Structures are given as structure tokens and as C-alpha cells.
Image: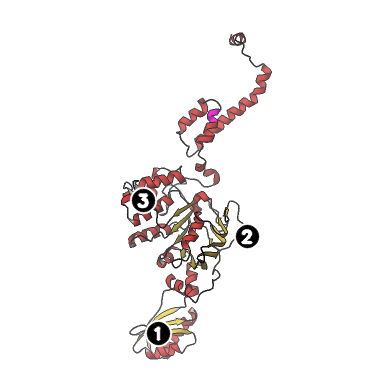
């Protein structure tokens, strides 16, 4: 009946052979629709419409225009991390330094053997005699790397180039992580005054991690010490609270590389300790590069350190090796009775580089090597017939090594004490930025 009506209305009905020829096209369209539905179900997030609405668009829309609309408009490509080996949600984060729902850094499968997380070669940015000059930086994956140097040494310029907000005059920057997984917190973060702390971090989340949710925002605020101020407008925040808020915005995207410029500069001692503990807890899960004028902070949390002066990298390597390489062994010797004979005898020893009185009954002794001091000091005291009360090694610190390294006499750049291996060519997946790129 329908066929007769079609002919009477002048509508052409395909023959059996034509229908058979169209069958592969129909099967292809059905498979395409099924693919879109499966992708919709597996996607951690979609854009503009809820998943049930997109399902109706795919099935009931102008077929197959609804499925095409989902792929072009609704598919959230930034959320498909699982297909790249970086799942957005990998269970609770037990460490103190990250969003509560997501694992970070090396825990997400970051290749530890793929070369440095950050590498520069001949990096130069000349501002007419100041800036950076031939900086070869190598930051291992999962490390906490501290940049130290006097004012004007080039720390902020270096971090700005690594972050991509400035371009080098020459040289290259190679990142061992995707650019979208790099987060930056400047030394003076600024935000719209009328927004609440939660809204500021949630805005950052929507830009860099749309697959995250409000729980991740609250987790970032809690880690930054702002859980109780989430509903406050940031116009009333102190400088230290703004610094914490900037750190929360950087962490909500779950970055693999975190760049921090003076993260503790505006914090009180208690707040500084909290932020330092937070950064230290990221070791092994994220790569963190931070600058600081407070050398005690660098020594406390950085396993690698770079010393800049006048735009040149004087030292790069393990923090403890810097201390050991640039400080001579030193002891504080306490004597019961007159210290003058012992002082004179110690000054006569060829291994003693400096011997000074250090108060009543105390002598400070510097030796050429650790072994010579440990063997020589007791022998000298015993030879003088003096009674030794104690002989304590004086703890070396980064500040003393820093002052020794950056003294005017140390004008020539030093080779890295323990250079990080740098591959001859960037491994697959690395991002390299050259001048003008």
C-alpha cells in the first residue's frame, strides 16, 4: 500500500539492488553513532550540555548531524588523560602536597628516565649588561630545585622564560612534560577583588582542569591553608593570604611541573613553615622549581640547588654537595683550663687552616680535610696534656656556602659539581622552545 502511494505521488523508491548498495553506508553511520555513544559514556567530562542530553542529541538529532555535533562541540579533549597514560583521577592522594582526589607527578606514570624535567642550553636574555648569560639548567624529574642568588641575579627572568611569559634572546628551553601540565605562581599574584577565594580557584580549575570539580577546589584551598577563608572576598586578603591563594590556583590543575617565584616571601614564620612542608611533600610526585632569598628555606626542602650571580649559573647540583665543596671542616673544641698552649699547638699544624679563640675555654678549628681534623685535634690536645671537654663539628649551612661561592673573588663560573645527565636529543614527547618560537 505504501509502495503504491509512493508511486502515485511521484516518489522514486530505490530498487533492491540500490538498497543493497546503500547498506554499507548505513552500517557505517550506525557504527559512527555507536562510537559516539561509547565515547560519551567513557568521557570523564563533556562540554556545554549534560551527558544524557548529548545522548539524545546523538540518537534523536538529525542523523548523523547530532553525532557530528557531539564530536565537534561536546567532546572534551582536555579531559581524556587516561588515553595518554595520565589519568585525571587515580584515587586518593595520601601526600600533603596535592588535590585530594588525584595522584600527581611521577605517580601518574611520568617517565623518570626520559631526561630532565627542564633543560636549558645556552639560555641568554641580555638587558644591556644584565639578564641571563649562557645558562645550562638541568632539573631532574620529581625533584625540588631551589634557585638562589643576590638581587638582580636573574632568578625571576629565568623562571619567566621557563614559564613561557618571556622569550630568550638565544638558547633553548626543553620541557620534559606537556605544556598544559606546567603551573606558575608569581611572586605577587593578583586577583579580582570582588571574587571569593573559592571562585578564584574554581575559575582557575575551569581553565586548566575542566574535568575536576568543587571537591578539588576545596582540596587545593585546604592544602594552601585557606579552607576557612573560601567564602571571603579576596579584596580583604593580606599579602600572605594572596600568596597562598596563588599557590592554590597553581595546584588545582594537578601540574607535573610547578614553578614558584619567592613562594614564602610574604608569609609569617608559621605560614612559611606550612608552605615549605607543602612543597617538600611534592617531592617525587611533582617537579618543583622555586626561588628564594631565604637560604635556610632552600636548604630545608631543596634536594638540588642552582646558584645565580650576575645572570650566570655558578653552581648546579645537590644541595649537600654544595655545602661540602665550599666549606672547610670546622670544629668547636672546649678545653678545661688554659686554652693558650692548645691554641698555639694547633696553629702550628700544617693541616689547620684557621685557629681562633671562641670564648672562655673554647677554640674554633678549621682543617683542610675532615680526616685530618678528626685525627689531628685529639692528638694535639693529648700532646699538650690538656683536658678536652668536647670536640663538636660545626654544622655547615647553605648560607655559608652561598657566601663563599658568590664572594667577589669567585668571579669565574664553576662547572656543576654533580651535573644531571642531559640526553643529546630531546626524548619523544618533550617540548622545545627556541627564540622567537
Q: Nearer the viewer, residue 315 or 3?
A: 315
The image shows residue 407, relative to residue 52, as above or below, that is below
Mark 1 Cα shell of 10 Å, populated few (<14), some (14-19), many (≥20): some
The image shows residue 373, relative to residue 317, as above or below, that is below
Q: Residue at x 65, y 26 (%)?
A: 24
Toward the right, the furthest residue is 17
The residues bearing labels 3 and 2 have C-alpha atoms spaced at a distance of: 42 Å
Say which mark, if any, is on residue 49: none
Q: Secondary structure at mark 1?
A: strand
Nearer-N-terminus badge (1/2) = 1
| Residue carrying label 2 | 424
Residue 240 visible, this orientation: yes
Mark 2 Cα shell of 10 Å, populated few (<14), some (14-19), many (≥20): few
| Residue carrying label 1 | 356
- Percent x, y for residue 315? 51, 68
Q: Is residue 301 magenta?
A: no
- Percent x, y for residue 33? 56, 29
Q: Quadrant of the N terminus?
A: top right
Toward the front, the furthest residue is 128
Residues tagged 1 and 2 counted as in contact (Cβ below 8 A): no
Q: How many marks?
A: 3
The residues bearing labels 1 and 3 have C-alpha atoms spaced at a distance of: 51 Å
- Percent x, y for residue 78? 51, 43
| Residue carrying label 3 | 222
Q: Which residues are magenta?
A: 62-67
Amino acid at each position: 500500500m505504501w509502495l503504491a502511494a509512493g508511486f502515485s505521488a511521484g516518489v522514486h523508491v530505490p530498487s533492491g539492488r540500490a538498497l543493497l548498495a546503500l547498506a554499507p553506508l548505513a552500517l557505517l553511520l550506525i557504527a559512527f553513532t555507536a562510537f559516539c555513544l561509547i565515547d560519551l559514556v567513557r568521557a570523564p567530562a563533556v562540554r556545554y550540555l549534560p551527558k544524557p542530553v548529548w545522548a539524545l542529541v546523538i540518537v534523536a538529532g538529525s542523523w548523523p548531524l547530532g553525532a557530528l555535533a557531539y564530536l565537534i562541540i561536546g567532546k572534551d579533549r582536555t579531559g581524556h588523560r587516561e588515553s595518554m597514560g595520565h589519568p585525571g583521577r587515580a584515587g586518593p592522594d595520601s601526600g600533603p602536597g596535592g588535590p585530594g582526589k588525584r595522584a600527581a607527578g611521577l605517580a601518574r606514570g611520568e617517565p623518570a628516565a626520559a631526561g630532565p624535567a627542564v633543560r636549558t642550553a645556552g639560555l641568554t636574555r641580555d638587558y644591556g649588561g644584565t639578564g641571563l648569560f649562557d645558562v645550562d639548567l638541568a632539573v631532574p624529574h620529581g625533584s625540588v630545585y631551589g634557585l638562589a642568588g643576590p638581587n638582580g641575579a636573574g632568578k625571576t627572568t629565568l623562571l619567566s622564560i621557563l614559564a613561557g611569559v618571556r622569550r630568550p634572546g638565544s638558547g633553548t628551553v626543553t620541557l620534559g612534560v606537556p605544556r598544559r601540565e606546567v603551573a606558575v605562581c608569581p611572586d605577587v599574584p593578583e586577583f579580582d577583588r570582588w571574587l571569593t577565594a573559592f571562585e578564584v580557584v574554581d575559575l582557575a580549575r575551569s581553565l586548566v582542569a575542566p574535568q575536576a570539580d568543587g571537591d578539588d577546589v576545596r582540596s587545593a584551598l585546604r592544602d594552601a591553608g585557606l579552607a576557612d577563608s573560601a567564602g571571603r572576598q579576596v579584596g580583604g586578603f593580606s599579602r600572605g593570604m594572596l600568596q597562598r591563594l596563588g599557590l592554590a590556583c597553581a595546584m588545582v590543575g594537578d601540574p607535573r611541573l610547578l614553578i614558584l617565584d619567592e613562594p614564602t616571601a610574604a608569609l609569617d614564620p608559621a605560614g612559611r613553615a606550612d608552605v615549605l612542608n607543602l612543597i617538600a611533600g611534592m617531592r617525587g610526585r611533582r617537579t618543583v622549581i622555586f626561588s628564594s632569598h631565604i637560604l635556610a628555606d632552600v636548604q630545608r626542602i631543596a634536594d638540588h640547588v642552582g646558584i645565580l650571580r650576575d645572570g650566570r649559573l655558578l653552581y648546579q647540583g645537590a644541595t649537600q654537595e654544595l655545602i661540602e665543596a665550599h666549606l672547610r671542616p670546622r670544629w668547636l673544641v672546649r678545653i678545661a683550663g688554659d686554652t693558650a698552649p692548645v691554641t698555639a699547638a694547633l696553629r702550628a699544624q700544617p693541616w689547620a687552616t684557621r685557629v681562633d679563640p671562641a670564648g672562655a675555654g673554647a677554640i674554633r678549628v678549621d682543617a683542610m680535610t675532615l680526616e685530618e681534623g678528626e685525627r689531628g685535634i685529639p692528638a694535639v690536645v693529648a700532646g699538650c696534656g690538656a683536658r678536652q671537654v668536647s670536640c663538636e663539628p660545626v654544622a655547615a649551612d647553605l648560607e655559608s656556602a652561598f657566601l663563599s661561592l658568590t664572594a667577589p673573588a669567585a668571579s669565574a663560573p664553576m662547572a656543576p659539581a654533580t651535573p644531571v645527565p642531559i640526553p643529546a636529543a630531546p626524548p619523544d614527547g618533550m617540548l622545545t622552545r627556541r627564540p622567537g618560537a
